[in-house]
Image (tube, grey):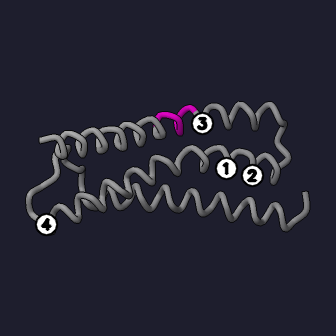
Amino acid sequence: MDKFEAAALWLLTFFAAFVAASARLAWLLFGPTAADPPEDPVQLAAWKRKRHWVTISEFAALPAFATGWVAAGMCWTLPVPLVVLGSMASGALGFGFLLNALHTIVLRRVEAARISNV
């Protein structure tokens, strides 16, 4: 692998980690979201924005963890079994985040279908 490919991989890793960290910080700054949308239009816009960034942070976690281990393995010439085990361990954590994001999306769709049927 040449230096350009390694630099591109590091940039992708940094961007994925930056998106995940930014979304998580935004979630922490604006507090937990309520399960039910608020009635006030201003609060509703903030509620939707927050849920959007929480979902993005959950989806960004899995590729950020896996790419980080692969990039670290390439940069520091770690043994391949260590890189695979590290990717699997961090992927298990990322998979939990992915399931949480999917849960949020499914609940949103179910809620939208329930509201449209009423």
Q: Earlier in the sequence, mark 3 or mark 1?
A: 1
Quadrant of the snapshot with the N terminus: bottom right
Q: Earlier in the sequence, mark 3 or mark 2?
A: 2
Q: Quadrant of residue 28?
A: bottom left
Please give the label number shown on residue 91.
Answer: 3
Image coordinates for residue 22, horizontal then vertical, percent:
44, 62
Image coordinates for residue 94, horizontal then vertical, percent:
53, 39
Q: Earlier in the sequence, mark 4 or mark 3?
A: 4
The three-letter code of the residue at mark 3 reads Gly
Please give the label number shown on residue 41.
Answer: 4
Q: Is residue 8 left or right of residue 25?
A: right
Does residue 101 belong to the magenta stretch?
no
- The answer to whether the residues at label 1 and label 2 have Cβ atoms under 8 Å apart is yes
Q: Residue at x 47, y 34 (%)?
A: 96
Q: Residue at x 75, y 52 (%)?
A: 71
Disc 3 and disc 1: Cα gap in Å?
Answer: 11 Å
Q: Which span is picked out in magenta?
A: 92-96
User: Furthest residue to the left?
Assistant: 39
The three-letter code of the residue at mark 1 reads Gly
Provide the residue designation for mark 2. 71
The three-letter code of the residue at mark 4 reads Pro
Provide the residue designation for mark 1. 68
